[in-house]
Image: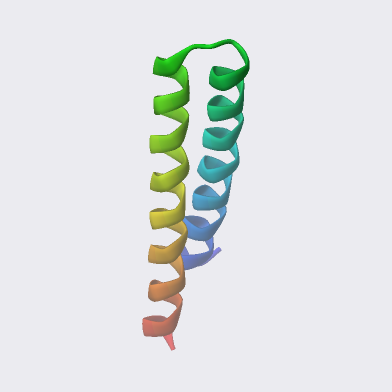
Amino acid sequence: MKPSTKDKIKGTFHEVKGKVKETVGQATNNPDLEAEGKAEHRAGKVEKKVGQIKKVFEK
């Protein structure tokens, strides 16, 4: 598997995981968990974008 594909998969996983944490944090009124989820969601988006950029330069 190419590194760009791995980055995109990891990014998507972290996006989803972060969104779940954010939602659970909101439901349980836990601001720390909500903030952690938001940060992980954003990090996942960045990682996914890095994978897309790597794919462009692989060609």
Q: Quadrant of the N terminus?
A: bottom right
Relative depth, front residue between 9 and 19: 19
9 and 49: which one is in front?
A: 49
Q: Is residue 28 above or below residue 26?
A: above
Out of 6 and 31, give the one closest to the viewer.
31
Horizontal side, residue 15 vs residue 51: left or right: right
How many marks can you see?
0
Outermost residue toward the bottom?
59
Question: Which residue lies at the image location 36% right of the left edge and 83% below the top edge?
Answer: 57
In the rendered image, residue 47, in percent from the top left (x then y), is placed at 41, 55
Q: Horizontally, is 24 left or right of 10 in the view?
A: right
State the quadrant of the C terminus.
bottom left
Where residue 12 appears, as percent x and y from the top left, is 57, 51
The answer to whether 51 is drawn above or below residue 29 in the figure is: below
Name the colouring of the figure.
rainbow
Judge by depth and name the residue closer to the eye, 36 or 54: 36
Q: Going 47% across and 24% down the picture, which residue do you hit?
A: 34
Residue at left offset 38%, top offset 64%: 50
| Location of residue 37 with respect to 3 vertically, above or below | above
Instruction: Judge left or right: residue 4 versus residue 9.
Output: left
18, above or below 31, in the image: below
